[in-house]
Amino acid sequence: SNRVLPGVLVAFRERDDMPWTLAVVRRLQKRIGDRVDIGVEYVGQNPLGVGMTDDDEGAAPANAPPDKKVAALYLPESAARPAMPFKTLILSPREFSLGRSLRLRSDGANYTVRLKEPIEEQDDFIWLPFEVVGRKASGPAAQDQPRHAMPTIGARSNLAPPARGSAAPPELPARQPAKRVAGAVKP
């Protein structure tokens, strides 16, 4: 309970065969003994780690080196309860700059996304929506996708992990299992 404080991003799942859920801790109440009640606010489900790079036209933060890789968690939209009607990203605060454009590469296309106004800002993360402002086909599979569609995250067969030692922007990686660190779940 010492590591779980209000404002912390947590990942959890009910069973090993269930999808991961991300939430922000909103309240913490200690009970008798070593029991703790934690109240959380839903952020999203099925997070996917993605790698991006700065787009040539976008404004990177002043301290960011050119072509620096940016790691983020991608959360797809969901119509199921609780509903999340738009796609979002979770970034490190040092990677955020309002209006910054980033390039995300998949097997079928390269997407340019522009960061929007944050939904949540904490010391360790920023949760924000984004808009797709450009798409360039990079393979025959991309020809069938709508102009501003994001990669189909559920269809993992056409997504490959990044090649080691490659100077190109990273591909969307396959979903990796989360690790437990001292009883806490770390995505």
Image (tube, rainbow, N blue to C red):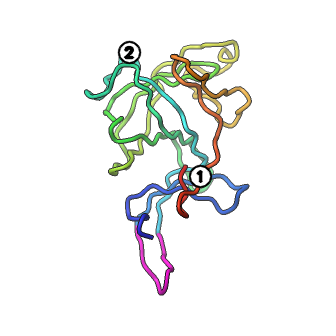
What's under tag 1, amino acid-wise? Lys
The N terminus lies in quadrant = bottom left
- Residue at point 47% right, 64% down? 40
- Residue at point 64% right, 40% down? 175
What's under tag 2, amino acid-wise? Asp
Quadrant for residue 9, please give it: bottom left
Determine whether 145 is above or below 175 in the image.
Answer: above
Residue 29 located within the stretch drawn in magenta: yes
Determine whether 9 is above or below 91 in the image.
Answer: below
Residue 11 located within the stretch drawn in magenta: no
Question: Horizontal and vertical percent for residue 67?
Answer: 40, 20
What secondary structure is marked by label 1? strand
Determine whether 56 is above or below 181 in the image.
Answer: above
- Mark 1 vs mark 2: give the one in front: 1
Question: Horizontal and vertical percent for residue 22?
Answer: 53, 53
* Residue designated by label 1: 179
Alpha-carbon span between mark 1 and mark 2: 35 Å
* Residue designated by label 2: 56
Decide: few, some or many residues near mark 1? Use Cα within 10 Å; few <14, some 14-19, many ≥20: few
View extreme (bottom): residue: 32
Decide: few, some or many residues near mark 2? Use Cα within 10 Å; few <14, some 14-19, many ≥20: few
Question: Horizontal and vertical percent for residue 142?
Answer: 65, 17
- Residue at point 39% right, 47% down? 125
Residue 165 or residue 131, whichever sits in front: 165
What secondary structure is marked by label 2? loop
| 4 sits to left or right of 60 | right
Magenta range: 27-38
